Image (cartoon, grey):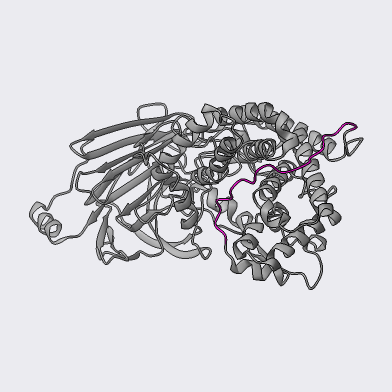
C-alpha cells in the first residue's frame, strides 16, 4: 500500500488481528482433538422440512444426471466419476457444488430417477468428502449445505432404506455440531448471518436438536439487531443481501409456526422492514438498482419473495440508516447513494459510489452504475468497486474510498476490505407540490485534495426532466487550493439499451430509449464526450455500453450544471419559447 495514514494502519492492523484469530479458531475447529464429542446426541429423525423459495429449473436435473455440473460460469463433466473427486476449476464452483443448492433442480424434476440421483450424490459426499475439505467446511458453505439438505430432505429420503437414513442424519448432526462451534468465527455479515439461520433451521427441524432452539434463537436475534438496519437495509449496504436473507428468513418463520414455537418478534419486525426496502431499490422494469456489490436479479426469485409481502407497504423515500435516497415523480425515478461506507468487517463487497445515482423513466433504465456480474466476480471486482464505475464524480483518476492494495494482505484476509472513505456526508431533502429536491455532499476527497463534492438533484412533479449540479468547494472553507491536482470527471453510465448521439454543439446528447421515447442530456457550459463503458450486471454477462463524460478542473469550473429532459411536443415548444438556461431551485 502507498501513503497510508497512521489511523488507517491502526484500523487495518486491528482488523487483521481479528481475522487472524478467527482463522486460527477455524483451523482448530477443523481439526479437533476428537472428531466426535464423547457424549453426542442421537439425531433420530427429521420432524419438518422447510420450504426452499429459490427458483428451480427442472431441465438442470438432466444435466446433473448426465454428470454435467455448471456453476459460477464453469462447466465440469464428470465422465462417470464423482464430482466430489474432481479438482474444482474455481472456489466459486466448489462452493456452489458443496453447498448442494442444486438439489432443488432435481426436486423440480420430481421423478424416481432424480430422487435416486440426489440420494446417490449425497451419499457420495458423505463417503468421499465428509472430512476436512477446506471449502466444504467453510462456515458459509456448511450453512448452505445444512439448509439445502433440510429443505430437500423429502427428495433425498423418499424411498431411502434405514441404513442411508441413519447415515444422512449422522452426517447432518456432525455438520450442525461443527457449525455450532465455528459460527462465531464465520466472516462477518451475510456468511455469519446465514450460519446462524442454518443453526436455527437445524434446531427446529431435527428432533434431537430441539434443546438448542433457545440458544439458536438468541443468536438469531443478535444478528438481526446488528445486521438489519432500522429502515430495513442490510449493514453491508448491498441491496442484493435483502433478497438472499429473505429467501432464508421467510421459511424460517414458517418453521417456527410448524413446530408450535412462537417466532421471536425481532424476526417479524425484520421481515416487515426489509420488504419495503426491496421495493425501494426496484426500477419500473422490476430490476434492482446497482450499488455496493449488487448484480443481476432473477425476477422470478424477487417476485416469489414479494408475494409474501402482505402489507405491500410503500417504500420509504429517505432511507437514512442505509444511506440511500429515492426521488420519484411522474414516470421518473432516481435512486441515489448518499451514505458512508459500511464497517470494515463487512466492506469486502462495498463500492466507492458515494453520490452516484441511477435514473429511469417508466420501464426504461437510463443512467446506471456498472454493477457486479453474476459470475466471474473476482475478475471484475476491483474495477467494479472503483468510483469510475459509478455515475458520479471522480477526482484525479482516484476513488472516493481507498481499498487494501497489498497482495499479501489480500491473500491473508481472503478479501479486499475498504480502508477508508467519506466520513462526513450531509443530506438535505425538500419536497414541495410533488417536486423533490435533494442536496448531498461528501468529504471522500478532502484529505487528499482538499475538495468537497456537492451534488444537487431536482425532479419536478411531472417527472419530465431531471436537473442536476455538481459543485466543488474547499474542505477548509473559502477558496479552493491554489495549486495541486484538481482534475475531475463527471460520468453518467448509460444502460446498454440506450442509444446515445452527441449533439453538434458538443454540449449535450440525444438519448433514444427502447420505448422509442427521446430524452436529451444538456451540460450547458461544458463539453461532453461519449465514451465506451461496460454494464457488468447483464443477465447474460457483461455487455458493452457507453457513458456520457464531462472533463474539467475544479479551480476553473467549480460548478457543473446538467439536465436530462424528456422530449415531447410540449417540451420542445416550451424550449423554443424560453431560450434560456434553467436555474436550480435549491
Residue in view at x 47 percent, y 46 percent? 291
Tell me the chief SS of the magenta region: loop
Q: Is residue 425 above or below residue 134?
A: above
The segment highlighted magenta reads: 38-56
Q: Is residue 346 above or below residue 370?
A: above
- The answer to which of 392 and 254 lies nearer the viewer is 254
- The answer to which of 505 and 567 lies nearer the viewer is 567
Quadrant of the snapshot with the N terminus: top right
Residue 341 is left or right of residue 144, and the answer is: left
Q: Position of residue 417 (x, y in %)?
A: 62, 40
- The answer to which of 171 and 241 lies nearer the viewer is 171
Q: Position of residue 279 (x, y in %)?
A: 39, 45
Q: Is residue 109 magenta?
A: no
**Quadrant hosting residue 316:** top left
Residue in view at x 79 percent, y 38 percent? 178
**Quadrant hosting residue 8:** top right
Identity of the residue furthest to the left in this view: 577
Amino acid at each position: 500500500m502507498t501513503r497510508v495514514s497512521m489511523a488507517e494502519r491502526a484500523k487495518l492492523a486491528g482488523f487483521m488481528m481479528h481475522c487472524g484469530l478467527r482463522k486460527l479458531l477455524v483451523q482448530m475447529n477443523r481439526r479437533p482433538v476428537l472428531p466426535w464429542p464423547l457424549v453426542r446426541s442421537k439425531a433420530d429423525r427429521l420432524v419438518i422440512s422447510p420450504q426452499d423459495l429459490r427458483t428451480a429449473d427442472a431441465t438442470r436435473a438432466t444435466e446433473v444426471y448426465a454428470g454435467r455440473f455448471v456453476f459460477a460460469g464453469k462447466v465440469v463433466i464428470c465422465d462417470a466419476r464423482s464430482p466430489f473427486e474432481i479438482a474444482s476449476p474455481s472456489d466459486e464452483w466448489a462452493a456452489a457444488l458443496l453447498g448442494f443448492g442444486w438439489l432443488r433442480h432435481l426436486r423440480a424434476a420430481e421423478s424416481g430417477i432424480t430422487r435416486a440421483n440426489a440420494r446417490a450424490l449425497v451419499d457420495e459426499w458423505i463417503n468421499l468428502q465428509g472430512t476436512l475439505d477446506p471449502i466444504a467446511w467453510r462456515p458459509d458453505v456448511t450453512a448452505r449445505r445444512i439448509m439445502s439438505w433440510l429443505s430437500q430432505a423429502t427428495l433425498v429420503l423418499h424411498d431411502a432404506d434405514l441404513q442411508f437414513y441413519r447415515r444422512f442424519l449422522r452426517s447432518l448432526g456432525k455438520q450442525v455440531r461443527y457449525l455450532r462451534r465455528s459460527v462465531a468465527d464465520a466472516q462477518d455479515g451475510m456468511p455469519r448471518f446465514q450460519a446462524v439461520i442454518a443453526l436455527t433451521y437445524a434446531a427446529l427441524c431435527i428432533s434431537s436438536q430441539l434443546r438448542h432452539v433457545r440458544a439458536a434463537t438468541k443468536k438469531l436475534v443478535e444478528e438481526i439487531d446488528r445486521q438489519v438496519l432500522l429502515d430495513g437495509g442490510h449493514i453491508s449496504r448491498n441491496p442484493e443481501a435483502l433478497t438472499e436473507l429473505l429467501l432464508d428468513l421467510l421459511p424460517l418463520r414458517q418453521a417456527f409456526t410448524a413446530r408450535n414455537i412462537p417466532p421471536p418478534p425481532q424476526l417479524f419486525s425484520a421481515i416487515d422492514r426489509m420488504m419495503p426496502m426491496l421495493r425501494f431499490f426496484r426500477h419500473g422494469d422490476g430490476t434492482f438498482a446497482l450499488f455496493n456489490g449488487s448484480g443481476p436479479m432473477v425476477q422470478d426469485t424477487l417476485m416469489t419473495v414479494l408475494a409474501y409481502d402482505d402489507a405491500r407497504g410503500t417504500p420509504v423515500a429517505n432511507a437514512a440508516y442505509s444511506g440511500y435516497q429515492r426521488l420519484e415523480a411522474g414516470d421518473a425515478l432516481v435512486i441515489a447513494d448518499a451514505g458512508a461506507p459500511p464497517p470494515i468487517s463487512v466492506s469486502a463487497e462495498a463500492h466507492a459510489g458515494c453520490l452516484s445515482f441511477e435514473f429511469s423513466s417508466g420501464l426504461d433504465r437510463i443512467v446506471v452504475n456498472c454493477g457486479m456480474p453474476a459470475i466471474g466476480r473476482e475478475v471484475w471486482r476491483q474495477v467494479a468497486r472503483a468510483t469510475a464505475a459509478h455515475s458520479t464524480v471522480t477526482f484525479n483518476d482516484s476513488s472516493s474510498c481507498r481499498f487494501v492494495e497489498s497482495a499479501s494482505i489480500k491473500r491473508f484476509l481472503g478479501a479486499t476490505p475498504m480502508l477508508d472513505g467519506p466520513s462526513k456526508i450531509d443530506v438535505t431533502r425538500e419536497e414541495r407540490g410533488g417536486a423533490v429536491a435533494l442536496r448531498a455532499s461528501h468529504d471522500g476527497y478532502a484529505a487528499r485534495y482538499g475538495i468537497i463534492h456537492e451534488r444537487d438533484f431536482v425532479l419536478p412533479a411531472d417527472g419530465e426532466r431531471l436537473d442536476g449540479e455538481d459543485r466543488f468547494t474547499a474542505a477548509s472553507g473559502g477558496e479552493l487550493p491554489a495549486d495541486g491536482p484538481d482534475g475531475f470527471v463527471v460520468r453518467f453510465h448509460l444502460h446498454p439499451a440506450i442509444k446515445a448521439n452527441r449533439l453538434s454543439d458538443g454540449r449535450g446528447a440525444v438519448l433514444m430509449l427502447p420505448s422509442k421515447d427521446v430524452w436529451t442530456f444538456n451540460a450547458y457550459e461544458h463539453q461532453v464526450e461519449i465514451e465506451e463503458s461496460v454494464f457488468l450486471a447483464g443477465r447474460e454477462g457483461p455487455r458493452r455500453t457507453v457513458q456520457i463524460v464531462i472533463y474539467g478542473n475544479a479551480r476553473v469550473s467549480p460548478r457543473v450544471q446538467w439536465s436530462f429532459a424528456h422530449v415531447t411536443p410540449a417540451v420542445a415548444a416550451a424550449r423554443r419559447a424560453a431560450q434560456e438556461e434553467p436555474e436550480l431551485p435549491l
